[in-house]
Image: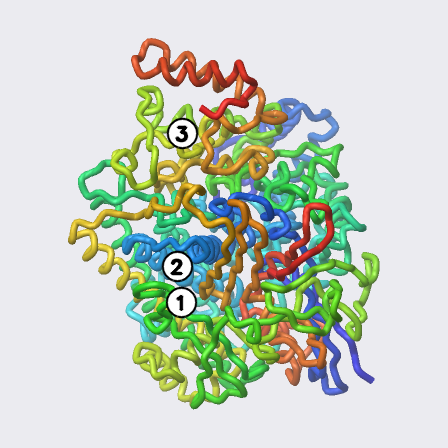
Amino acid sequence: MAKKIVVDPIPRIEGHLRIEATLNESNVIEEAYSTGTMWRGIEVILKGRDPRDAWAFTERICGVCTTVHALASVRCVEDALGIAIPTNARIIRNLMNATQVTQDHLVHFYHLHALDWVDVVSALKADPKQASAIAQSISPWSKSSVGYFKDLQQRLVGFVESGQLGIFSNGYWGHPAYKLPAEVNLIAVAHYLEALDFQKEIIKIHTIFGGKNPHPNYLVGGMACAIDPNSDTAINIERLMMIKKIIDDTNTFIDQVYIPDLIAIAGYYKGWLYGGGLGNYLSYGDFPETTLADFKTLLWPRGAILNKDLANVIDVDPRDSAQVTEEVSHSWYTYSGGDGKGLHPWKGETTPSYTGPKPPFEHLDTTKKYSWLKTPRWKNHPMEVGPLARVLVAYAKGDPMIKETVGMVLSKLEVGPEALFSTLGRTAARGIECKQTAGFMTHYYDQLIANIKTGDYRTFNSERWDPSAWPEECKGFGYTEAPRGSLGHWIQIKDKKIKEYQIVVPSTWNASPRDVNGNPGAYESALKGTPMINPEQPLEILRTVHSFDPCLACASHLFDMNGKEITSVTIV
Amino acid sequence: MQSNQTFADLFRARGVSRRDFLKFCSLTSVYLGLSPSIAPALVEAMENKPRTPVLWIHGLECTCCSESFIRSSHPTIENLLFNMISLDYDDVLSAAAGHQLEAVRKKIMKEYKGKYILAVEGNVSTKDDGVYCMVGGDSFLNILKETAADAAAIIAWGSCASFGCVQNAAPNPSGAAPVSDIIKDKPIVKVPGCPPISEVMTGVIAHFHTFGTLPELDHLGRPKAFYNTRIHDKCYRRAFFDAGMFVTSFDDEATRKGWCLYKMGCKGPTTYNSCSKIQWNGGTSFPIGSGHPCIGCSEPNFWDKGPFYERLAAVPFLGSDSNADKIGIVAVGAAVAGAAAHAAVTAVKKVKSDKLGNDKA
């Protein structure tokens, strides 16, 4: 007789996510169902507003991957209005994006994901001498003395003895799925705290260019931060040196802390290769060296992979109405032409219609509609997006930087490339990518200096700032690869106002419910077949769901001011 | 203070007798405006449980408040989590999930009845039984009511929980409401901003931890220590405003010289926050400092106060802001008096006030 378990709330993510799963007699997950339980309606709110303001509204979709919606938004408005941004603006946006990915991945690994692999309480039993020896054997990182680990352990003991465990309350400590020796747990706890302190430094690059973080400021047409080496208020040498120091420190931290920890921890779990899931991967690509339209110059390449076939990377065009579609057969909406008919975001519709049980409730009826998320599909295939998808597309396309890092990680772990198709592979891909984007930060800093040296201080193109220079009607598409995957914004502008605005977000791809043919989404597929040691303590579910880095910020859908729904988009 | 030290330990270590400690506690309760009967509870709390339990719940939000919180440079988050509060329930950092996590919330509510702080990030969805935001199979609306019932006080993080913010902007499709619309019988500290500055957030907690009382609040429920003056009043570009020297296009010569962004739509003159003083991310910069006008993200209804890049003179002022506007005009008038360039600004303001804000000068 199948058992049904529910995990809700799921912490250490962004937003509200629920997982229901059925287990067989051996406690192996037979089916899993992913539910987004929140809806905010940002696109509704955008209608009729000034397109130049859209970045600020959409940026508030997510405060964890803050900036990514602002970036996709200014890109789609510029695409619609035909605005070419200055070289400095392209470089600064790329640098901010690389900063975001690097900081976000680091925070994900240590603060959102590590506790699925690291037993904090076990660290109390560690021998600080041995911890120090291990730490020094895997990395030149300087904070690795016996005294350092001893002091940390004493603080931990004091914390635990206070009887108030705070964020560690009621964790699954002692769960047999935890495999790390006490000393490695102690090292990981030390770096949990160090990364918590360090992440706030990385992000200061956003503050320098965008004035604050979370939610730095962007600008349609470029960036608002002026550059002038001879000004006491613009980006000058003091600001540049601060950026340079942050970039250097970030690369050191990733190389000496994150990557060695990732490899050390993964080494103890390489027998746990569950969670592969769909085997279909999608990336829009990002980090343009010239313009966004010239996607052959993207440092993160564009492409799709089906059925783990790395020999065949398929071309992707998100503007093509036959490629990206959304349907609502299992979502709390209805479509006039039938809920199972996939519609391109340009032609979407949204009629919110909650048919779930009235809260409070025990279970959802997963044979019917069960999520506020829609179901996006690429050429009718469910797709996984995010670091693993990007790394695989780059790897399959022969990107030398990715091939080298992937090769290094696989050889250190003594596993083959097939190990990448797993929860652990997803977690490793995030680390591999983080090392790469930290390198991008240096690359863009060098580009910025080189461009300033030519005497080019421009950061903004004012030609079409004034709405009088705009066409009567136009539409645009903007994309980015957010830390969690492919993100697209579609805008239509009419009479100088936003007519329609539509967004399809990474976590909608990954967390989507089943489609009309009963095919599960990426989370649902990845959880299937996972054995659970103790279903009461769903550590294995958390591992796999967290490996996607869920961002359930909002599922918003467009309808007109009278409450009559016209068009849609799911944001999650 | 060491993590495993109680206040009583600390007092003993400093040579304070138990008798004096008890006296301190009863005086503190008087100082806090609490009934004398609460003193024993305070004694117990300070002797045995040095860290105040905090339950941090999330409604309709984007988690930017939590992200800002962990950026704090002083106190650091580690210090705060280890020595000041016990963050027993938090969607972002908690290790436990599902019913184990919910069990922690219920346990704290029971064991620390009337003594825990409830921190709320996000709006409450009030429409259709709250189905637009559900947690653990219940509506966030129900969870908020349940968790607030026995809280000592509530901290409303960010513009969402304080006033509304983005999902509450017109036409507010999910029926998003601030905490104070739902909870009427508890002290609520509003810490607006999208997000609030990290040191302001941790400052509110540190204030409570250090002084044993909630910070003094203004008429909108915001801590005076952080929301007492307008960004404009302490802006380093204020001198350019007073001199009538304005940026008129992003990336023009005036932009590079750091002139005033008022004509680019800066909402600094009507926004109460500490951005121009404390600044952001450890004092690194703030929006105006990086060349972008303030969008007024800590003010009520800031999303619906007109396009961000339209200068204030053309923006209609609503609700509580009408005061700020009047104050602003007086301040502008006073500041500009006597300076040659002022005549123009004052004239603009005069026209504007004469025409009830309809003039687009």
Mark 2 is on which residue type? Asn
Q: Quadrant of the N terminus of chain A?
A: bottom right
Q: Mark 2: which secondary structure?
A: helix
Q: Mark 3: which secondary structure?
A: helix
Q: Quadrant of the C terminus of chain A?
A: bottom right
Closer to the eye: label 1 or 2 = 1
Is residue A175 depicted above or below A209 in this figure? below
Residue B147 in picture, x, y percent from top left: 73, 46
Colouring style: rainbow
Letter of the chain that mark 1 sits on in the rendering: A
Per the model, the C-alpha gap separating discs 1 and 2 is 9 Å
Q: Mark 1: which secondary structure?
A: loop
Q: Which residue is mark 2?
A: A97
Q: Are marks 1 and 2 in contact (CB under 8 Å)?
A: yes
Q: Pick whichever, A43 or B178, lies toward us.
A: A43
Label 1 CA crowd tier, 10 Å (few <14, some 14–19, many 20+): many
Is residue B196 depicted above or below A394 in this figure? above
Say whether residue B348 is left or right of residue B164: left
Residue at the limit of the structure toward the front, as seen here: A472
Which residue occupies 56% across, 69% down?
A: A546
Label 3 CA crowd tier, 10 Å (few <14, some 14–19, many 20+): many
Which residue occupies 45% across, 16% down?
A: B331
Q: Which residue is mark 3?
A: B262
Residue A246 in picture, x, y percent from top left: 30, 54
Closer to the eye: label 2 or 3 = 3
Q: Which residue is mark 1?
A: A286
Q: Do the residues at pointers 1 and 2 share their chain?
A: yes
* 1 or 2: tag closer to the N-terminus: 2
Per the model, the C-alpha gap separating discs 3 and 1 is 35 Å
Mark 3 is on which residue type? Tyr
Per the model, the C-alpha gap separating discs 2 and 3 is 29 Å
Label 2 CA crowd tier, 10 Å (few <14, some 14–19, many 20+): many
